Image (cartoon, rainbow, N blue to C red):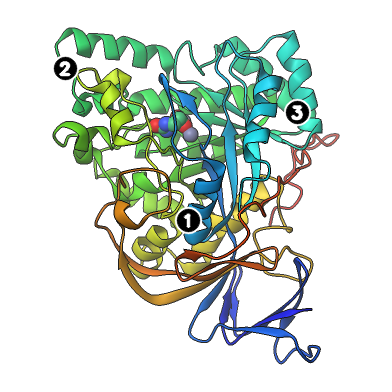
Amino acid sequence: MGLLIKGGEVVTAEGRSRSEIYIEDETITAVGRELCVAPGTEEIDAAGKLVFPGFIDPHVHIHLPFMATFAKDTHATASKAALIGGTTTFIEMCCPSRNEDALEEYQLWKQKAEGASACDYAFHMAVSRYDARTEAQLREIVRDGTASFKIFLAYKNFFGVTDEELFRTLKLAAELGVITTAHCENAELVAQLQQLLLAEGKSGPEWHEPSRPEAVETEGTSRFATFLEQTGAVGYVVHLSCAPALRAAVSAKLRGVRLFVESVVPHFLLDKSYAEREGVEGMKHVMSPPLRDKRNHSDLWDALQAGLIDTVGTDHCPFDVEQKLLGEGDFTQIPNGIPGIEDRVNLMYTFGVKHGALDIHRFVDALSTRPAKIFGLFPRKGTIAPGSDADLVIYDPEYRGTISAATQHSANDYNGFEGFPIEGRPSVVLVRGKVQVRDGVFVGEPGRGRMLRREPQYRVRKGAQEELAHAG
Ligand code: URP
Ligand code: ZN
Ligand code: ZN
């Protein structure tokens, strides 16, 4: 039997209209006015609501062994939190460390998600070491449908790669037509600055930012762009935090480097004073790149509105308070990261769309459509059109609430946005035609999520630059 969503205002990256949406099984089959539907069709009344395509978080960590501990969420908890917040697909970083076997870890990450996630998901495959064995394994992983790599220029001796490994990874990525995402900070500079600060007795969380200043991220961003330029690969900077790094990325875009830019919610809304708070309150806000001086915010919002920042993710990293305290007395041991998978859509809607910093179509574009296009999920995901998966968020713009760890669904005991007001939230969330969430409550099938297999889409065409097949 079909399902009709009526009475709402359909909002996509391109436009808005008072349309009905007809769904058969898992797929949207018609969008329009006064659709003819079979008698007995189930209906959802979306009057007074906005209807968005399901949101896509392009950067999350769920299973994450990192800094002597493991992030707290399971795929069951993180996916429910994602859905309650309107995210119907996430792309998880599969992150083996340097001394682990890439293929074995990829299989482990897949096993952890399979049958456990309530929403759809895909992976970025981190390349933490590059040798002949890794190369063969990466080819196999791409054949399996994981068509994006992840490189860390940070985290010396753990996830971080050498410049030689970066070069070889990008050459392979260019040959295979896959995109490479990159954490852009100079690992050696961070390691040296950390030691200098600790030697001076500067050990609290407030020293995390000075150990990885804006210049360290700017260098990483420029270097990544230069390596893309020299290898012909396509790249994506993750969690960009500051104006100088943004300028490096935009300068690369302007000279024709095929480079996309992601920033994450904390860098639009929080600043380094949060990490300067006393004790564990500061530790909760330690992430990399670090929270920056507030003066960066307006540049990031402007760049997001202009589309120079392509996407907004979360870098969801659920380490709880006990884990953060591993870094008491030594900021270099604080597990990096902050949770956010549940709050991204509501925060960006509230502080972006409602407060006038972000056009509603750019909001949909940055949080859904562009991640889908960049990572090979479009038009299956990221839009509302016949043939697309029926992943929909029926959004209540009149809802008022407050973010709090006490009411969140991620398996974490704090929320870095505690007390932030919210002006809107998902009322109904569908994944492939099935209602998974109603008004902040998960009501669906826990293991419904599927792994999304993606084709490489950045093949080099003869005599042409790499093409983004579905762009524009
Ligand atoms: O602080 C962060 N971002 N932690 C998670 C690992 C990463 O860098 O993505
Ligand atoms: Zn990172
Ligand atoms: Zn990350």
- Looking at the rendered structure, the kind of residue marked 1 is Ala
Taking the spot 60% from the left edge, 43% from the top edge, the residue there is 91
Q: Position of residue 438 (x, y in %)?
A: 51, 71
The kind of residue tagged 3 is Ile
For the residues bearing labels 2 and 1, Cβ distance under 8 angstroms? no
Query: Between tags 2 and 1, which lies in front?
Result: 2
First reached walking from the N terminus: tag 1 or tag 3: 3
How busy is the neighbourhood of tag 2: few (under 14 within 10 Å), some, or many (20 plus)?
Answer: some
Q: Is residue 364 above or below residue 291?
A: below
Relative to 379, is 283 on the left or the right?
Answer: left
In the rendered image, the vertical position of residue 137 relative to residue 115, given as above or below: above
| Residue 141 - label | 3
Name the residue tied to disc 1.
306
Foreground disc of the pair 2, 3: 3
Q: Which residue is drawn at 45% across and 44% down?
A: 263
Q: In which quarter of the image is residue 72?
A: top left
Q: What residue type is labelled 2?
A: Lys
The disc label shown at residue 202, or none: 2
Position in image of residue 122 (x %, y %): 66, 42
Residue name at image x 70 percent, y 63 percent? 432
Q: Do the residues labelled 2 and 3 touch (CB within 8 Å)?
A: no
| Crowdedness near tag 3: few (<14), some (14–19) or many (≥20) residues, C-alpha within 10 Å | some
Q: Helix or strand or loop: what does disc 2 sit on?
A: loop
Helix, strand or loop under label 1? helix
Could you tell me how far apart the alpha carbons at marks 2 and 3 are, in whole angstroms? 43 Å
Residue 128 at x, y percent in the picture: 58, 18
Give the CA separation, mark 1 to mark 3: 35 Å
Q: How far apart are the two marked residues, 2 and 1, measured between alpha carbons?
A: 39 Å
- Name the N-terminal-most of marks 2 and 3: 3
